[in-house]
Amino acid sequence: MTTITLSADEYQALLAEQQRLTHQLRLMTVERDLLKERVDAFLRRLFAAKSEARANPAQRDLFLNEAEALAPNGAPVAEEALPEAVEVAGHQRKKRGRKPIDPHLPREIVRHELPEAERVCAHDGTRLVEIGAEISEQLDIVPQQVRVIQHHRVKYACPCCDESIRVTPAPARIILKGLLTEAALAWVVTAKYQDSLPLYRQAALLGRFGGDLSRTTLAASMVRVGHAVQPIINLLRDHLVEADLILGDETVIQVLKESGRTAQSKSYLWAQMTGSGPPIRLFSYTPGRGGIHAQPLYDGIKPGVALMSDGYEVYNAIAVARGAIHLGCWAHSRRYFIEAEAAIPKAARNAQQPATQFIAAIGELYTIEANAKDLSAEQRQQRRQEQSRPVLAKIEALLLPHLHTVTPGSLLGKALHYLASQWPKLTRFVDNGAWPIDNNRCENAIRPFVVGRRNWLFCDTVAGARASANLYSLIETCKANGIDPYAYLVELFRKLPLAKNAEDFEALLPWNLTPSAH
């Protein structure tokens, strides 16, 4: 056996090299784990369920991303199977049966009569008389009817000379010499921006009923009508900046033809909504996401207004510049912990995991909110002071020990640092019962646009993007006010060309305009 003798200097050099390699291995291991965590998170985003619902029934409906409610067997609940409540002594018994058809729908009566030969009593031969009828109803659907409105502008002339020929002037139209009527324009707008039906599908659908319209014609009409409603959008913005509570969010939109930018460049659609006063939903297009684009959208808001947003730093700059009270979104904070918990192997998951503890504590805040949703703002503020403040103290006590003991680049580290950076904003909601705990209402308002984007994918031009933002604003504001968008748009398109002054335009806002029968 050979013995190797090292000098003290050689030994120290070897020891230093060993420590360097050990440190490098530790760094590579951490980097590998972080990269694996990111890949797993990306795969979950692509293929896993998007719902953030938890097992606690009190929290279940607060975080659902899906619009459909599922029955216990996993099938969608059919409207016809909704139960009726029947009063029975001592309790209510649920009666199963078909839900009645809307009584306001027009009805066509079809009589089914016995043949003459069968209207005779089998016992004594007397002729039977009518004593009533058994009534059942079916829902009938009449397909779209495409027709042509032919306008005859009558000409008048003097029978004695050729000097006095007059023609009845053309009626005012929202699109000068437009091919589509106001009702047709409203149908196309609601089909695209409410029902997410792309224009090429609308063109194909109309073609089956004799409406030979190209997608280019429909697109040009949408751009023109979207610009024509700009005075109403301006008035909505005037009302929005006067609100005491404003919620904001943004999402990506792609515009193919934009000067100085490639087709792959990201543009943005900004959503703003009121949390007080008339319900308003506004969408605005910008070519970027920086403060230079966002700041003008909040020009004119009152100092002291409450601004609810996610943790994007631009909103903080807006709040500081405008003297607003910036509120943080607990749903965003919770989402980071959901992602961190999902990265934990199932075998290692338990109630003692930090991510799970934070999720449970945040769930307590939402349980308090759910129980206080029917209270007045003053009562809700008192409830928050009494019940939510202790929960916030518990979350803060849980945050401090973990903040500097977790790798910042990990999913849990990101969740902790987001919570720490947003903490002052996240705790302000307890000071006012009218302030929301999260930005979910604004996210829900922007979701129809995201659904539509999956179908039509992009906007062709900047003019089209801005027109789409205007039309989305009208559709979502109508829905927020409980107004049928189609009926409102038909009336708006008919009356907007006749508006001359500020009072006329104010009367055309969704909550002021009453559709008339035509």
Image: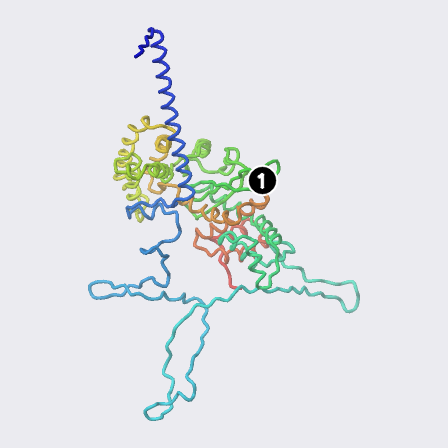
Above or below, comparing residue 197 to residue 49 in the picture? below
Residue appearing at x 45%, y 37% in the figure: 302
Above or below, comparing residue 225 to residue 398 in the picture? below
Outermost residue, front direction? 1
Residue appearing at x 45%, y 55% in the figure: 483
Residue 101 picture quarter: bottom left
Query: How far across and how far down the image is residue 360, in percent?
Result: 28, 39
State the scheme by which the image is colored.
rainbow
The amino acid type found where label 1 is placed reads Ala
| Residue toward you, 451 or 478 | 451
Numbered-mark total: 1
Outermost residue, bottom direction? 124
Disc 1 target residue: 263
Quarter of the rendering occupied by the N terminus: top left
| Residue toward you, 353 or 180 | 353
Query: How far across and how far down the image is residue 496, in percent?
Result: 57, 53
Q: In what element is the residue under mark 1? A: loop
Query: How far across and how far down the image is residue 448, in percent?
Result: 46, 49
Above or below, comparing residue 497 to residue 517 in the picture? above
Left or right: residue 177 compared with residue 87: right
| Residue toward you, 363 or 370 | 363
Left or right: residue 240 compared with residue 416: right
Residues packed near mark 1 inside 10 Å, few (<14), some (14 to 19) or many (20 plus)? some
Residue 303 picture quarter: top left
Query: How far across and how far down the image is residue 445, in percent?
Result: 44, 47
